[in-house]
């Protein structure tokens, strides 16, 4: 793993909120990346996240497909109002 700077962490959160998902690479180890999306319990309130851990060398196409599937599944789990 590696230590994150607070400013970088806050910036990453803003990007993830805008995109609706987050991808981190090499935070736990040098071989994996994590794809994560929020599950909402009410509009705007994140209750949980769902994530997939995949090999760091997973293709951009496969990563994009997995992110789309992840977002679709978290949307189905979310309470939207």
Image (spheres, rainbow, N blue to C red):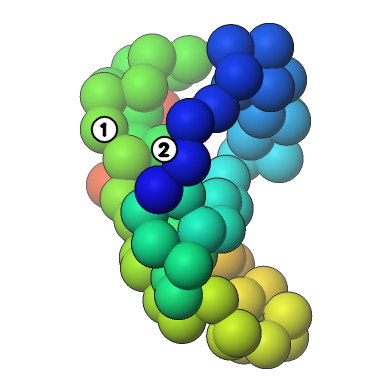
Q: Quadrant of residue 56?
A: bottom right
Between 58 and 80, the one nearer to me in the picture:
58
Q: Is residue 34 above or below residue 62?
A: above
Query: Where does label 1 land, which residue?
Result: 48
Q: Residue at x 48, y 31 (%)?
A: 3
Residue contact between numbered discs 2 and 1, judged by CB atoms under 8 Å: yes
Q: Which residue is mark 2?
A: 38
Is residue 47 rendered to the left or right of residue 45?
left
- Residue 43, percent from left and from top: 44, 17
Q: Which mark is residue 40?
A: none
Label 2 – label 1 distance at C-alpha: 6 Å
Query: In this rendering, does residue 69 appear at all?
Result: no
Q: Left of 37 or right of it: where is 42?
A: left
Q: Is residue 77 visible?
A: yes
Q: Secondary structure at mark 1?
A: strand
SS at badge 2: strand
Q: Quadrant of the C terminus?
A: top left
Q: Position of residue 23 (x, y in %)?
A: 58, 53
Nearer-the-camera pick, 48 or 60: 60
């Amino acid at each position: 793993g590696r230590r994150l700077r607070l400013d970088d962490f806050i910036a990453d959160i803003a990007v993830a909120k805008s995109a609706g998902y987050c991808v981190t690479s090499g935070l736990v180890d040098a071989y994996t990346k994590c794809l994560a999306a929020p599950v909402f319990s009410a509009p705007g309130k994140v209750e949980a996240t769902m994530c997939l851990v995949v090999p760091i060398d997973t293709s951009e196409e496969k990563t994009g497909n997995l992110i789309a599937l992840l977002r679709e599944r978290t949307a189905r789990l979310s309470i939207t109002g």
